[in-house]
């Protein structure tokens, strides 16, 4: 598949089968992601490979946070937990803190590029992804569960990776002229 076709067909996958994909494929995607544009080569990424016990704790946190907003049925609790547990892999995404607002802005752009590279690579292999920024991966309890010091690393969510159970249809994009200004 060429880059244009891959870009136009890749979708954010919200629903995953419980099938497992090869760890090596995920490692290849993460290694490739390190080739993202990276101003001054700061290498700000922090990727945390979440094991089963950690995912169970985060699934519980996700369900707890949803239940704090409204009473959940057992089906809704299971769905909240499945959202965290069903994808084959879940990688927490963090950025090293620098204390420099401009650099941290550039570092976030680098993270976004790196995630896109990983997602494009995996999509080409038939694997779905979603960069989730749900509160359960940025909550103070998440830092404790992951053993991350919030003074050193800012959690930016997680990358869900797995076999899609549903691939959303692509929506039409507006014309470029709507966004392009020529001077």
Image (spheres, rainbow, N blue to C red):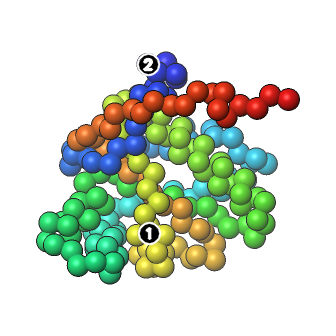
- Marking on residue 135: 1
Q: Is residue 180 above or below residue 144?
A: above
Q: Position of residue 148 (x, y in %)?
A: 52, 73
Label 2: state its secondary structure: loop
**Can residue 7 be seen by looking at this rendering?**
yes
Compared across the picture, whether 135 is left or right of 65 comes to right
Front-most of 55 and 167? 167
Front-most of 133 and 179? 179
- Mark 1 is surrounded, within 10 Å at the Cα level, by few (under 14), some (14 to 19) or many (20 or more) other residues, namely some
Compared across the picture, whether 162 is left or right of 106 comes to left
Q: Position of residue 49 (x, y in %)?
A: 42, 57
Residue ID at (52%, 22%): 4
According to the picture, the residue beneath numbered tag 2 turns out to be 1
Label 1: state its secondary structure: helix
Q: Quadrant of residue 53?
A: bottom left
| Residue furthest out toward the left | 74
Which mark's residue is nearer the viewer, 2 or 1? 1
| Residue furthest out toward the top | 2
Q: Position of residue 75 (x, y in %)?
A: 14, 66
Q: Is residue 138 above or below residue 108?
A: below
Which of disc 1 and disc 2 is earlier in sequence? 2
């Amino acid at each position: 598949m060429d880059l244009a076709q891959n870009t136009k067909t890749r979708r954010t996958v919200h629903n995953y089968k419980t099938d497992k994909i090869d760890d090596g494929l995920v490692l290849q995607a993460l290694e490739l992601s390190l080739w993202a544009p990276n101003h001054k080569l700061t290498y700000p990424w922090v990727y945390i490979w979440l094991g089963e016990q950690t995912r169970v704790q985060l699934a519980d946190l996700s369900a707890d946070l949803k239940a704090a907003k409204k009473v959940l049925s057992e089906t809704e609790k299971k769905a909240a937990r499945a959202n965290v547990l069903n994808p084959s892999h879940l990688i927490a995404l963090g950025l090293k803190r620098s204390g420099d607002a401009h650099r941290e802005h550039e570092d976030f752009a680098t993270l976004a590029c790196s995630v896109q590279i990983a997602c494009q690579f995996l999509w080409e292999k038939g694997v779905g992804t979603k960069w989730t920024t749900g509160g359960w991966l940025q909550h103070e309890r998440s830092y404790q569960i992951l053993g991350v010091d919030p003074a050193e690393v800012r959690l930016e969510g997680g990358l869900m990776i797995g076999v899609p159970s549903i691939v959303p249809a692509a929506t039409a994009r507006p014309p470029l002229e709507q966004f392009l200004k020529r001077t």
